[in-house]
Amino acid sequence: MRSVEDEYLPARRKRRPWLIALPLVLVAVVAAGWTAFWFHAASVTRTVLAGWQENEASLGRVYTCADPDVGGFPFRFEFRCTDPVAELRSVTPPTTLAAKGATVVAQIWEPTLIVGEAVGPLKIGGVGAAPVLSIDWALAQASLRGLPTDPERLSVVLDRPIATSLDGGREGLVGQAGRAAFHARIAGGSARQNPVLDLALALDEASAPVLGRAGVVPLDLDAVGVLRGLPSLAPRPLEETLRTLQAAGGRLEITRARLQQGDIVATGTGMLGLSPRGALDGELQLVVVNADKLLPLLGLDQLVNQLLPQATREKLAPGLDKLLPGLGAVLRGPAAGGGVSVEALGPATELEGKRAVKVPLRFSDGAVLLGPFKVAQLPPLY
């Protein structure tokens, strides 16, 4: 005699395969739909890139790639480019940038964050001419938050960058660093109208032998500032951007800066702008530790020795001491036991628990003055 359970058991066994197969069917449908969506989006991405290249070319910026490829299935979009080349014909002089490779990635769930990585070296030269500068690195990464047409934040980081001159076949080290980082974000306005930019620059163990003695000793730099005066972030030639910034009275406010080079430590704040001919104007208020080592590093002690004989320096020193205490000691020089006195630069103070001196660093239409001393003459930026 069959029980009630035996009567219903066959029917239950018939329904069980459908229950097992249904989730598998749903997964297959979702997977097929996602695959179709991804490949459609990849096709749209290729179309958008092609349109962007055409638009950029019409503005004098030609971008080419030896072997473009869109990948990253299933959870991200990845654009890979071999031997990317950028011909910037709209800048003065027209410039070509060429690298070995570049990769740009965006995750499906966070499409407004784009991360890129480049393979060096990056070679820079005139359009149709041999490169004059090569920049290489161990790792180069960049990230962009927001849409390319409406960016919110940009970061660029280079590990162990090194720049080498190739001009005229005379290779030589221009500069290098353990690490270089640049960050920018929109703090006010928008990319399309009157942006206010927060900027940050960091250099670790950076040196530039082309600057002479001042560039041989490695330095660390950490600077933060705010840039005002740009009408928008629309791409335009650098010269045009700087002219627009100057005409609008734009300023870069250095809110915090710290530089250390050997035993010399300096912090500063101030404001920088451009003169009508495109040279630097403004002033930074510096506080310097071991300022007595700064002037010899800049070569000012040798300049004084070359311009004035020792006898003349001795005669002028007492009068200069009355005008600015300690300045006479600079003129007397090491031969007279005077050396370089920090009092010649400015009043004494303290920084990070060490004796320091306050000194203004002024920029006057390209002339650079550290305290009473002219240390350089910078060319116009346009």
Image: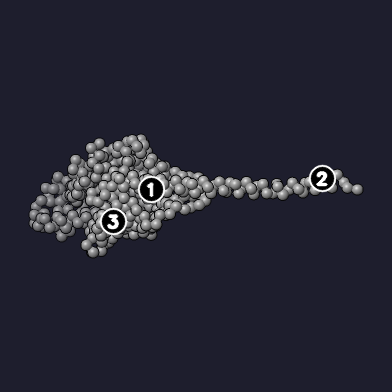
Q: Earlier in the sequence, mark 3 or mark 2?
A: 2
Identified at 13% across, 57% down, the residue is 305
- According to the picture, the residue beneath numbered tag 1 turns out to be 50
* Residue identifier under label 2: 8
Which of the 4 image quarters holds residue 171?
bottom left
- Residue 306 falls left or right of residue 117: left
Could you say where residue 142 lies in the image, as x and y percent from the top left? Answer: 39, 50
Amino acid type at circle 2 is Tyr
| Residue 2 x %, y % | 88, 47
Nearer to us in this view, 237 or 352: 237
State the CA–CA distance, disc 3 to disc 2: 81 Å
Q: Can residue 266 be seen from the camera position used here?
A: no
Q: Nearer the viewer, mark 3 or mark 2?
A: 2
Type of amino acid at the residue the image marks with label 3 = Ile
Read off the residue under disc 3: 124
Amino acid of disc 1: Ala
The reply, left or right, for residue 9 in relation to residue 51 is right
The quarter holding residue 297 reads bottom left
Looking at the image, which is closer to me, 294 or 321? 294
